[in-house]
């Protein structure tokens, strides 16, 4: 029984993803953007950096749903899916963190000192803490997985950790910026971006397709890796 | 069910009282860590004090809580399997570790007071915060210790699994406690409520998820 349902093998959603990403990259790099002080042209990073964060959340959510399905059905293909959706989510998380670092280097960082000297101040931002913590949690998930030799026990325990971590982490990620902002108002005058109010309509018509496109790409990566893993297992069996 | 939890809790307590080396082991760990800190620095400023205090609490918690599940042998697990429901077992362990960590928190706060000074203004209120923190830490680490024990791993993996997960709670705790250092700061109950909500969430999750991992 394949872990990826057969309707996922169809090509229409992959083509949609490619079309949306082509649109994102062309319209994102060439389209009109508002000229804001400090941000200037770096605002185009919105189509890449913020979408990575969205994609990561969606992929981790898929991963935890697969973990729940594993615990209900005890079927190994859900475990495989859970593992590889988490992997794709981590890839997006790393890309999101690095695009964020590049963006911060041009906007938040003090231009008078080097970015590496500045980084410890910038990384204290609640959103950056949330991103770093969720990456650490999922690295721990992979370490835990690989430390258990028995296949069924590995699947069960890592599914339990996946659900536990998700349920603790995600409320915290949504809560922390609100609590920390209430204690540190103004963020020292740094430009912070509010997706709903700060994005002009000309940017929104690129931003929403970009989120969908990047997420589809993540799902594509995950399904390919799941199918590859299954072929490897089939080879071992024969 | 309440009786089963109570019996299992009493069993853990009796074991602790009879084999006191583990309690004294943690105590010694706390004292010696603190003494090393004391010798390596003068009385720290409040911000540093706060950071050090919660980090030390974290390490004490890992050491105190880890053995709760890790000490149980495979044979004993099979024996429990015939006797009790998994939810009662995990609730009894949570209860026991909460009490153990509450006691350790009070002791380590006393030691901090003696060796590194007291930047907080209201001792009673701060004690409450420290107890709340100890409870939050011990709940999360108890369940992670169950995972680590079932993965047949040692306490080292507990740190890997737990540190990133405990960070949100730790940030909240440090905020709550650092507000106690200046006279002007108003008491903000939002982080306290959030912490309590997270604690409740951990207990619920532990009782839902533990039945899946306790079987061999």
Image (spheres, coloured by chain):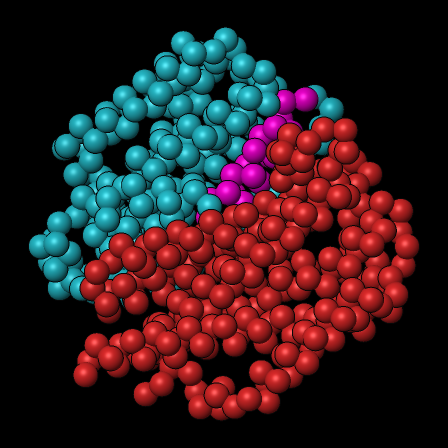
Chain colours: A red, B cyan
**Circle count:** 0
Q: Is residue B51 above or below residue A136?
A: above
Q: Is residue A72 visible?
A: no
Q: Is residue A100 above or below residue A64?
A: above
Measuring 67% from the left and 70% from the top, which residue is drawn there? Answer: A211
Q: Is residue A32 above or below residue A22?
A: above
A11 with respect to A186 (left or right): left
Is-magenta flag for residue A5?
A: no
Q: Is residue A4 visible?
A: yes
Seen from the viewer's position, the closer of residues A46 and B82 is: A46
Most common SS among magenta residues: helix
B113 with respect to A34 (left or right): left
Query: Which quadrant is home to the C terminus of chain A?
Result: bottom left
Measuring 42% from the left and 69% from the top, which residue is drawn there? Answer: A84
Query: Which quadrant is home to the N terminus of chain A?
Result: bottom left
Seen from the viewer's position, the closer of residues B141 and A2 is: A2
Dividing the picture into quadrants, the one containing residue A184 is top right
Q: Position of residue A99 (x, y in %)?
A: 65, 53
Is-magenta flag for residue B177?
A: yes
Measuring 27% from the left and 54% from the top, which residue is drawn there? Answer: A147
Measuring 38% from the left and 48% from the top, which residue is drawn there? Answer: B161
Q: Is residue B207 above or below residue A17?
A: above
Q: Which residues are magenta?
A: B165-182
Q: Position of residue A83 (x, y in %)?
A: 39, 67
Seen from the viewer's position, the closer of residues A12 and A62 is: A12
Q: Position of residue B121 (x, y in %)?
A: 61, 19
B31 with respect to B150 (left or right): right
Give the farthest residue toward the left: B75
Q: Position of residue A129 (x, y in %)?
A: 59, 45
């Amino acid at each position: 029984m394949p872990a990826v349902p057969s309707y996922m093998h169809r090509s229409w959603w992959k083509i949609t993803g490619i079309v949306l990403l082509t649109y994102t990259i062309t319209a994102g790099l060439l389209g009109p953007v508002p000229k804001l002080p400090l941000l200037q042209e770096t605002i185009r990073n919105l189509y890449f950096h913020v979408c990575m964060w969205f994609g990561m959340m969606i992929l981790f959510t898929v991963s935890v749903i697969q973990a729940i399905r594993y615990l209900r059905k005890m079927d190994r293909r859900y475990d495989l899916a859970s593992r590889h959706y988490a992997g794709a989510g981590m890839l997006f998380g790393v890309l999101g963190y690095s695009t964020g670092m590049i963006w911060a280097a041009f906007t938040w960082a003090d231009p008078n000192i080097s970015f590496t000297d500045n980084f410890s101040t910038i990384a204290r931002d609640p959103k950056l803490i949330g991103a770093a913590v969720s990456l650490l949690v999922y690295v721990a998930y992979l370490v835990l997985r690989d430390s258990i030799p028995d296949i069924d026990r590995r699947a069960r325990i890592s599914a339990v950790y996946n659900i536990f971590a998700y349920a603790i982490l995600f409320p915290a990620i949504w809560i922390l910026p609100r609590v920390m902002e209430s204690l540190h108002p103004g963020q020292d005058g740094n430009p912070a971006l509010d997706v709903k109010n700060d994005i002009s309509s000309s940017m929104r018509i690129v931003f929403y397709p970009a989120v969908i496109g990047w997420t589809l790409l993540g799902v594509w990566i995950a399904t390919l890796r799941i199918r590859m893993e299954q072929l490897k297992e089939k080879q071992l069996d024969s | 069910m309440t009786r089963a939890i109570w019996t299992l809790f009493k069993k853990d307590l009796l074991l602790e009282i009879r084999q006191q080396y583990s309690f004294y082991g943690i105590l010694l760990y706390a004292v010696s860590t603190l003494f090393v800190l004391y010798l390596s620095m003068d009385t720290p400023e409040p911000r540093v004090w706060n950071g050090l205090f919660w980090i030390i609490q974290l390490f004490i918690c890992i050491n105190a809580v880890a053995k709760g599940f890790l000490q149980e042998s495979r044979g004993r697990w099979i024996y429990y399997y015939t006797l009790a429901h998994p939810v009662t077992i995990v609730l009894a362990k949570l209860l026991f570790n909460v009490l153990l960590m509450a006691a350790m928190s009070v002791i380590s706060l006393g030691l901090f007071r003696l060796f590194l000074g007291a930047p907080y203004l209201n001792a009673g209120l701060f004690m409450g915060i420290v107890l709340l923190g100890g409870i939050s830490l011990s709940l999360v680490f108890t369940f992670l210790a169950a995972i680590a024990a079932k993965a047949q791993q040692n306490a080292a993996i507990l740190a890997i699994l737990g540190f990133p997960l405990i960070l949100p709670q730790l940030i909240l705790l440090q905020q709550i406690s650092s507000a106690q250092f200046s006279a002007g700061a108003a008491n903000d109950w939002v982080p306290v409520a959030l912490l309590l909500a997270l604690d409740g969430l951990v207990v619920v999750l532990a009782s839902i998820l533990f039945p899946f991992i306790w079987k061999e």
